């Protein structure tokens, strides 16, 4: 071999990484609240812990990725939504535990640093953080030649929040006869992309720029719609005391996510005529000849978040949701039975 | 196409994932302290926040990966160390901010679920958590066909701890004349693996089972030595008030990690004869014809953690470290100058 061997030869370019990090600094700073005590580049982010007003404060934490939505982002060369989604996915998971998010940390890894993708992802995450008063307090960017396929990236993130212990729902609060309310999603959110891509691109041979009249936009745009946050609509309703349990409808769909918050002797029955499954899901089902059961196990099918509420308070909660612009429906009810969801 | 199309056809096997998750449940449960309020499978992990004894509690958070050490783990078919390392890396990052770790969340992603790898990683993480009293409160496992190279996996994790604000070091505490103490690493920890692999396997054509007399073990074993935790040795010393700053020596080595905790008008001068660079690093340098500067910018070179302490307390701190079994050396001192590290 000729000459010296450097880290750059091994596929890792620390300087290019540093340049991108400088560019994202500004986005991240916009999320900094006065409670943040550290600057970017600290070994660990520090945030003053304010527990005033909490009787029994509980730390609530969740870590998530965005699945193979990263593949569609790559095909569209549009990465901002990934940063947004990894934050809102976590916000919704925390909301299930009645928690208000405080801080977020992102993890980005790829074969070879693509500064533009990196900047967009962090920008998207920072905007979603700002919209929820979350400090983007840390992050890690890894170049991993030989682990990721060329050009691909993965995005994950960890969110930490705080909840009042007495307000955290437990299955014990759910009762037979409780109403099950569903709030609209706006697309696939971040689940089912492996199946959707296979069906739409490999089986149906659709193109990203194919206009879908029934959806009202191009396929690529429909697939990159952001994962909705339900925080601003739902968090204020926790004080009503009417909400007995919540579920964020992610991988596993209604079938697998609702039972996570049910007592062992109760099931939920859902009337599938209570809302209309959006056209994008029907398109996937038709092109892939996918069974109903499989569709409902993989996709949210138009329902992004579920509330289980006292029956007599259901219309009050539905009204409140609709007042803040949410499309929400009474999907069904809690019944005696094995812990499961029946969609009939 | 014949028949129905299912999620499994798309490369995602939810059932196999669920079986593995059942197996790791036991490892994770061992980390649960009485403060943990949620079971595995909750949308977000909940932990009672205990701030008794803290005047001004600060949340401290860090997210990390283990870099391409995952490649070596794959070659050795031994994944437990990855789980261990992602925890101890975070523990050390928190320690820099004088924080005691409370909870950890892991993120594992791969092209196709390999239950054995998954189980080992979580087992390694759970053991490292237990050794530090950390609750492994959540995790995410993602199968990402089309993003990861076949057989490869990535491991990341987020750690949250608590610190007393008055005890968190700031650059303002560092003073000219302060002593710089280095504590021994036991190998590459989790940094420089892309360069190390390229040099050792591609340039030098060494085999994993090659016995290295100077190192005293096989190459594969040397490369998979765990990332050390400095928590138990260093955390008790924080009460002495003698420690003005700390640095965890990760990617960027001594050159880039020490300046992160220096004031802008001070530099650190290190005498490289003050400790012996371990044989594994010398082996990489020789085989790759890598410059000194590059070696010290990529690898820890035998120093895993650095303390900057009041000069007159240096021998007391060195004694205390040696008493608990740490190899530690006086590396150099803080001087007036631009914020940098000089290794002479």
Image (cartoon, coloured by chain):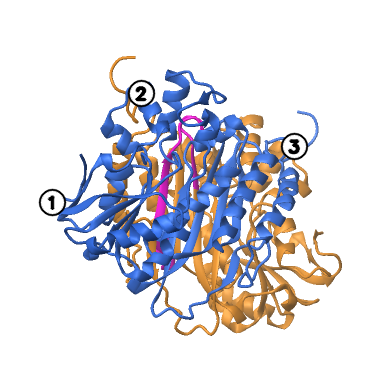
Chain colours: A orange, B blue
x 86%, y 68%: residue:
A337
x 68%, y 55%: residue:
B27
Relative to B47, residue A216 above or below: above
Q: Is residue B276 visible?
A: yes
Q: Nearer the viewer, residue B252 or B289?
A: B289
| CB atoms of marks 3 and 1 within 8 Å | no
Within the magenta stretch, is there residue A272?
no
* Residue B189 point in image, percent of width and height: 45, 42
Helix, strand or loop at disc 3? loop
Please give the residue where the numbered disc 3 appears in the rendered image.
B5
> What segment is highlighted magenta in the picture?
A129-155
Residue A235, image quadrant: bottom right
Crowd class of label 2 (few under 14; some 14 to 19; many from 20; radius 10 Å) = few
x 28%, y 28%: residue:
B291
Q: Which mark is residue A20?
A: none
Helix, strand or loop at disc 1? loop
Looking at the rendered structure, whether the residues under marks 2 and 3 are on a common chain is answered as yes
Q: Subunit of mark 1?
A: B
Q: Which mark is residue B337?
A: 1
Helix, strand or loop at disc 2? helix
Relative to B267, residue B232 above or below: below
Q: Nearer the viewer, residue A201 or A121?
A: A121
Q: Subunit of mark 2?
A: B
Q: Which mark is residue B286?
A: 2
| CB atoms of marks 2 and 3 within 8 Å | no
> Sequence order check: which comes first, mark 3 or mark 1?
3
Q: Marks 1 and 2, Cα distance to the nearest angstrom? A: 33 Å
Crowd class of label 3 (few under 14; some 14 to 19; many from 20; radius 10 Å) = some
């Amino acid at each position: 071999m000729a000459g010296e061997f450097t880290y750059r030869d091994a596929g890792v370019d620390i300087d290019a990484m540093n340049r991108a990090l400088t560019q994202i600094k500004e986005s991240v700073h916009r999320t900094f609240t006065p409670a943040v005590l550290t600057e970017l580049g600290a070994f660990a982010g520090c945030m003053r812990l304010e527990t005033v007003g909490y009787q029994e404060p509980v730390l609530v934490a969740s870590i998530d990725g965005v699945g193979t939505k990263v593949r569609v982002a790559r095909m569209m060369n549009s990465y901002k939504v990934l940063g947004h989604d990894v934050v809102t996915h976590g916000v919704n998971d925390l909301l299930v535990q009645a928690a208000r998010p405080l801080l977020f940390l992102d993890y980005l890894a790829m074969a070879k640093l693509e500064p533009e993708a990196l900047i967009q992802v962090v920008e998207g995450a920072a905007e979603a953080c700002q919209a929820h008063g979350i400090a983007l307090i840390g992050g890690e960017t890894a170049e991993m030649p030989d682990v990721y396929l060329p050009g691909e990236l993965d995005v994950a993130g960890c969110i930490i929040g705080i909840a009042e212990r007495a307000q955290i729902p437990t299955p014990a609060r759910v009762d037979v006869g409780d109403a099950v309310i569903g709030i609209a999603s706006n697309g696939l959110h971040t689940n089912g992309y492996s199946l959707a891509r296979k069906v739409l691109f490999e089986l149906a041979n659709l193109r990203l720029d194919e206009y879908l009249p029934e959806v009202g936009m191009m396929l690529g745009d429909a697939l990159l719609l952001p994962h909705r946050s339900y925080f601003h609509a739902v968090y204020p309703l926790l004080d009503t005391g009417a909400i007995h349990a919540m579920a964020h409808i992610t991988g596993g769909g209604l079938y697998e996510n609702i039972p996570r918050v049910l007592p062992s002797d109760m099931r939920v029955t859902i009337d599938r005529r209570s809302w209309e499954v959006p056209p994008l899901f029907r398109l996937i089902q038709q092109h892939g000849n996918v069974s109903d059961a499989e569709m409902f196990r993989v996709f949210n099918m138009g329902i992004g978040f579920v509330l289980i509420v006292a029956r007599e308070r259901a219309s009050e909660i539905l009204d409140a949701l609709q007042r803040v612009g949410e499309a929400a429906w009474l999907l069904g009810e809690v019944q005696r039975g094995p812990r499961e969801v029946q969609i009939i």
